[in-house]
Image (cartoon, rainbow, N blue to C red):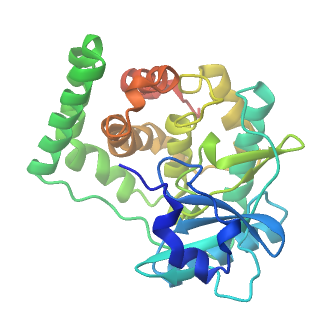
């Protein structure tokens, strides 16, 4: 599975007027096409974004509004061509290159990441036209597919954990539509334009402050789902992050920094444990299964993270 050959995207480079000499050979991100280039003499990044173009344009307006409030996010480059733009059957965007360093897992980096997420959620710019968060509609067959897939992946890559993990996850997955989804979907939770992909790998630190460099999965969604996703998956896919989820102390620092900007409602606080379980069953299970397609279980750091994700107690991330 690969998305990294620049030669496969010549029409994209042509749209953004990137000459042959300025094109890289490959994407620098293994999971999707993300290409470093030079535009108008400056370093830039061209990457795929959410479609259709109207949704990409709404995300662009969102990040531009955030930047207008001095929130650290990238915004599309002003170009003579459409940006974002549809090229072929996909939508693409060009951003400036952000010079900085990756996340290190230090206490300061953890707190700064929580602070930025809080500022993003607190800004609350208009979300007109943003992609709407979609609620799942699992049937018995899709539940069985998840159960079978998780059992298979654990059997191949973490056989010592399989029985323990499946004893927890199988009943959760089977009761998801009746017990986990309705409270979160129907609980009147505050919604906002949110990243829905707030992870260490999508941040670059400039003078100690993080900048969100990949806002392209943004949706109009319950904001605590975005927070729950960060709690569970912040260290996923990040080579410089520790091989695990947040520790209790790291979560305390992250969430405390977040809550300096956001006053969570009583409904959000009451439903937080359910929201974490929701994200664990939707995003977490998918992460565990999909990792096998990318050979991530064979990487020692990623393997450590995946084993922690498979066995995590959702109570590890309290908000009360």
The foreground one among 74 and 88 is 88
Q: Give the residue furthest to the front.
A: 21
Q: Say if residue 246 shows up in the picture.
A: yes
Tell whether 123 sits left or right of 146.
Answer: right
Tell whether 171 sits left or right of 315.
Answer: left
Q: Quadrant of residue 297?
A: top left
Q: Say if residue 128 shows up in the picture.
A: no
Q: Quadrant of residue 138?
A: bottom left
Residue found 73% across the figure and 63% down from its top: 74
Where residue 164 appears, x then y in whole percent?
Answer: 25, 15
Residue found 30% across the figure and 37% down from its top: 289
The foreground one among 260 and 210 is 210
Where residue 42 appears, x then y in whole percent?
Answer: 83, 67
Tell whether 101 sits left or right of 203.
Answer: right
Q: Quadrant of residue 109?
A: top right
The foreground one among 46 and 26 is 26
Q: Is residue 313 positioned above or below 222 on the image?
A: above
Where residue 228 appears, x then y in whole percent?
Answer: 51, 42
Which quarter of the rendered picture does the C terminus lie within? Answer: top right
Residue found 68% across the figure and 56% down from its top: 213
Q: Give the residue furthest to the right.
A: 207
Q: Is residue 120 positioned above or below 102 on the image?
A: below
Q: Give the residue furthest to the left.
A: 141
Residue found 49% across the figure and 58% down from its top: 5
Tell whether 55 sits left or right of 19.
Answer: left
- In this rendering, the count of numbered labels is 0
Where residue 172 appears, x then y in whole percent?
Answer: 24, 34
């Amino acid at each position: 599975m690969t998305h990294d050959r620049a030669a496969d995207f010549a029409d994209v480079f042509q749209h953004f007027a990137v000459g042959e000499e300025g094109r890289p050979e490959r994407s620098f991100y293994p999971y999707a096409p993300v290409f470093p280039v030079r535009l108008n003499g400056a370093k830039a990044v061209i990457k795929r974004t959410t479609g259709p173009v109207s949704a990409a344009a709404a995300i662009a307006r969102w990040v531009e509004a955030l930047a207008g409030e001095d929130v650290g996010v990238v915004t599309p480059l002003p170009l003579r061509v459409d940006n974002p733009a549809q090229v072929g059957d996909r939508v693409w965007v060009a951003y400036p290159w952000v010079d900085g360093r990756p996340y290190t897992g230090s206490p300061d980096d953890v707190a700064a990441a929580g602070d930025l997420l809080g500022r993003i959620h607190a800004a609350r710019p208009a979300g007109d036209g943003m992609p709407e968060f979609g609620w799942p509609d699992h049937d018995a067959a899709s539940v069985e597919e998840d159960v079978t897939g998780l059992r298979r992946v654990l059997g191949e890559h973490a056989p010592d954990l399989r029985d323990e993990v499946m004893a927890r996850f199988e009943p959760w997955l089977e009761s998801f539509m009746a017990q986990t989804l309705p409270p979160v979907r129907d609980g009147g939770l505050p919604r906002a334009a949110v990243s829905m992909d707030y992870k260490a790998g999508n941040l670059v630190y400039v003078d100690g402050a993080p900048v969100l460099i990949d806002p392209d999965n943004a949706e109009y969604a319950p904001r605590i789902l975005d927070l729950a996703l960060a709690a569970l998956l912040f260290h996923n896919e990040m080579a410089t992050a520790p091989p695990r989820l947040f520790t209790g102390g790291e979560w305390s620092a992250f969430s405390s920094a977040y809550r300096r900007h956001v006053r969570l409602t009583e409904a959000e606080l009451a439903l937080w444990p359910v929201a974490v379980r929701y994200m664990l069953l939707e995003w977490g299970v998918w992460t565990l299964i999909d990792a096998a397609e990318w050979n991530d279980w064979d990487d020692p750091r990623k393997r450590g993270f995946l084993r922690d994700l498979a066995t995590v107690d959702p109570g590890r991330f309290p908000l009360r």
